[in-house]
């Protein structure tokens, strides 16, 4: 198989390494706007390197020629999902990504035209295959499969702010800027930025964190993938309270707006991101990380055997593999034709839970747990 990985940043190159190590993969094409970065990744995968501008349709078409799958690892996805999915459809190449913002999910999953076009092209498009969304959606699916009448899904997460990854900060600023939907009462609602805070006690060593409504894919993708649910909510935060205060201040004072300001010569958001990416900005916006892993928690509530039921799952990841491993697992399933669909889906809408979690269990850096009614955790069993 010939797999094109677009984007050789922290997570993109991790996905490339995972895919390159898989049986049946002959060539991984590492593509990046920065040719030197692509070459460094290609030297490790023993594959090919290419320069890639996602907003150049002709260049994308040339890159995708002869590919068995394209993996889009370039964010922010509210800007980058559309051009790459367009190219995948034009070239009839299956598409996979780790998109983690609601705007990309709403674009691809709520507009039926994308599903129809992917079907007409004979390809599968799978969006949101990382840790949150991705593993969170698959845990929701697992819980719903174990319950006669699932009604509510709650996805919660906490993670480290790091100035070393300004793209991740860009993403989290955007999805918390007030546009994010939650699925409540069978419909999408938009409660606004930092709405409905609650305290969640994650497994040690993460512990208690104050989370708030946020804009990952799950409130869009999970109810579309699992019909009959009444509520799907997503709440998250940074581990560091100082980082959450920074996030809230930037949103409150309008720095997440893309509306151009003549005096700035650009939009407030683009000016802020440029500052974060600068040497001066990195010095001012550096916040010490907490020595704890990223944590996810998924609760599924409903009825089983005529009685109220509640299932709780958690996951922890101290490395990037919580994102790169599930992304590679789904991408390879899609490239091998194992998912058996055409159109647009989230992983929970097309990936078998047993095969997914068995593959993920082989990744020692990603720890998944199920928590019983007494609050005792044990390794996830499928």
Image: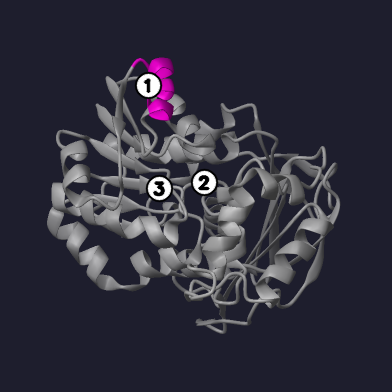
Q: Which residue is mark 3?
A: 97
Does 212 sit left or right of 19 as displayed?
right
State which mark lies toward you, 1 or 2. 1
Task: State the mark number for residue 130.
Answer: 2
Q: Is residue 38 magenta?
A: yes
* Residue located 79% across and 47% down the image: 287
Q: Give the dominant element type of the magenta stretch: helix, strand or loop.
A: helix
Q: Which quadrant would residue 146 be assigned to in this image? A: bottom right
**Mark 1: few/some/many CA within 10 Å (<14, 14-19, 20+):** many
Does 20 sit left or right of 64 as displayed?
right
**Mark 2: few/some/many CA within 10 Å (<14, 14-19, 20+):** many
The residue stretch that appears in magenta:
36-46
Q: Quadrant of the N terminus?
A: top left
Does 306 sit left or right of 89 as displayed?
right
Label pair 3/2, CB-CB below 8 angstroms = no
Does 187 sit left or right of 209 as displayed?
left
- Residue 285 appearing in the image: yes
Q: Which quadrant would residue 293 be assigned to in this image? A: top right
Give the Cα separation between the discs numbered 1 and 3: 19 Å
> What element does badge 3 sit on?
strand
Q: Where does residue 346 sit, x and y in percent of width and height?
A: 41, 56
Which colour style is shown? one colour
Q: Which residue is mark 1?
A: 42
Q: As displayed, is residue 166 above or below residue 182?
A: above
State which mark lies toward you, 1 or 3. 1
Foreground: 222 or 308?
Answer: 222
Q: Quadrant of the C terminus?
A: top right
Q: Earlier in the sequence, mark 1 or mark 2?
A: 1
> What element does badge 1 sit on?
helix
Residue extending farthest to the front is 263
């Amino acid at each position: 198989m010939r797999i094109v990985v677009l984007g050789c940043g922290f997570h993109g190159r991790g996905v490339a390494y995972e895919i390159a190590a898989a049986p049946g993969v002959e060539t991984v094409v590492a593509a990046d706007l920065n040719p030197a970065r692509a070459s460094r990744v290609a030297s490790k995968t023993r594959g090919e390197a290419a320069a890639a501008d996602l907003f150049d349709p002709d260049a994308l078409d040339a890159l995708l020629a002869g590919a068995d799958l394209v993996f889009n690892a370039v964010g922010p996805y509210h800007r980058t999902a559309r051009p790459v999915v367009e190219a995948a459809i034009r070239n009839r190449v299956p598409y996979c990504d780790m998109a983690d913002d609601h705007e990309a999910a709403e674009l691809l999953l709520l507009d039926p035209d994308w599903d129809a076009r992917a079907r007409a092209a004979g390809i599968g498009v799978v969006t949101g295959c990382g840790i949150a969304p991705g593993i969170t959606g698959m845990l929701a699916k697992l819980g719903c499969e174990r319950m006669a009448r699932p009604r509510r899904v709650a996805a919660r997460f906490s993670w480290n702010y790091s100035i070393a990854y300004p793209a991740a900060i860009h993403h989290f600023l955007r999805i918390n800027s007030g546009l994010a939907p939650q699925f409540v009462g069978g419909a999408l609602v938009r409660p606004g930025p930092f709405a409905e805070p609650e305290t969640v006690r994650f497994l040690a060593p993460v512990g208690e964190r104050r989370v708030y409504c946020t804009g990952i894919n799950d409130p869009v993708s999970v109810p579309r993938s699992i019909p009959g649910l009444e509520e799907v909510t997503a709440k998250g935060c940074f581990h560091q309270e100082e980082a959450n205060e920074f996030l809230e201040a930037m949103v409150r004072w309008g720095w997440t707006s893309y509306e151009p300001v003549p005096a700035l010569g650009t939009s407030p958001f683009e000016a802020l991101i440029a500052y974060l990416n600068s040497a001066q900005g990195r010095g001012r916006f550096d916040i010490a990380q907490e020595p704890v892993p990223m944590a996810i928690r998924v609760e599924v509530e409903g009825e089983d055997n005529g009685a109220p039921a509640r299932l709780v799952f958690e996951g922890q990841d101290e490395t990037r593999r919580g994102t790169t491993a599930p992304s590679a697992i789904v991408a390879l399933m899609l490239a091998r034709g194992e998912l058996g669909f055409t159109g647009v889906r989230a992983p929970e809408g097309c990936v078998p839970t047993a095969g997914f979690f068995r593959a993920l269990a082989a990744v020692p850096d990603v720890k998944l747990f199920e928590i019983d009614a007494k609050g005792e955790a044990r390794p996830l069993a499928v």
